[in-house]
Image (tube, rainbow, N blue to C red):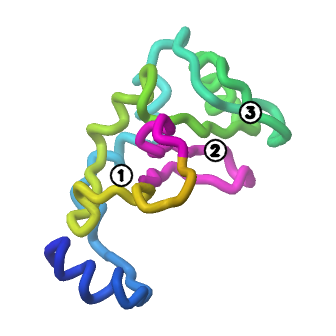
Amino acid sequence: IIHEEFVLQYEIPRKPVMLTGCATNWPATKNWKMDHLIPRFSNASNWRASIGSFDGIEDDTLWGNIAEAMLKKDPFYIFDPLDFGEARDLKKDYEVPFPFQGADLYGHLNNFPPDSGSMRWFCMGSPFSGTMPHMYG
């Protein structure tokens, strides 16, 4: 479905819709599993993450510590924007579904800060953290 048709059929009438098959060929389906992620990034790179509890998030958690938590099956979660650092590399593993390509999902919001970045995040966590690898944006 082309963008204009999507807008007319679903967006303007505010009709719920579910897109299927969008991720079928995404490298993320393989590359975002722990065994592929652990060696992918520098152990010294900084991520927004939490290790050991789900109480708070730190802006400068070392990837090496996150990887160790993954291997030891310790509690962790990552909530990192894709605009900075090594997380930018994750963008090549997916693409925005066609009806949304070029769309500004935040452009019509009142009082939305213009310097908020792309609002695309990589979120991943251990079991019971409430987040599996996914992309929002």
Residue 120 among magenta residues? yes
Q: Report the Cα–Cα distance between label 2 and label 3.
A: 12 Å
Q: Which mark is first along the chain, 1 or 3?
A: 1
What label does residue 57 carry, if any? 3
Q: Horizontally, is 127 left or right of 54 in the view?
A: left
- Given residues 8 and 129, the one toward you in this image is 8
Q: Farthest left residue?
A: 2
| Three-letter code, disc 2 | Gly
Q: Residues within 10 Å of mark 2 (few under 14, many from 20)?
A: many
Assign a secondary structure to mark 1: helix
Q: Farthest top residue?
A: 44
Question: Please, what is the dominant secondary structure of the magenta stretch?
Answer: loop
Q: Residues within 10 Å of mark 3 (few under 14, many from 20)?
A: some
Camera-nearest label, 2 or 3: 3
Residue 91, percent from left and from top: 33, 38
Residue 100, percent from left and from top: 28, 63
What label does residue 29 carry, if any? 1
| Three-letter code, disc 3 | Ile
Q: Horizontally, is 124 left or right of 83 in the view?
A: right
| Three-letter code, disc 1 | Thr
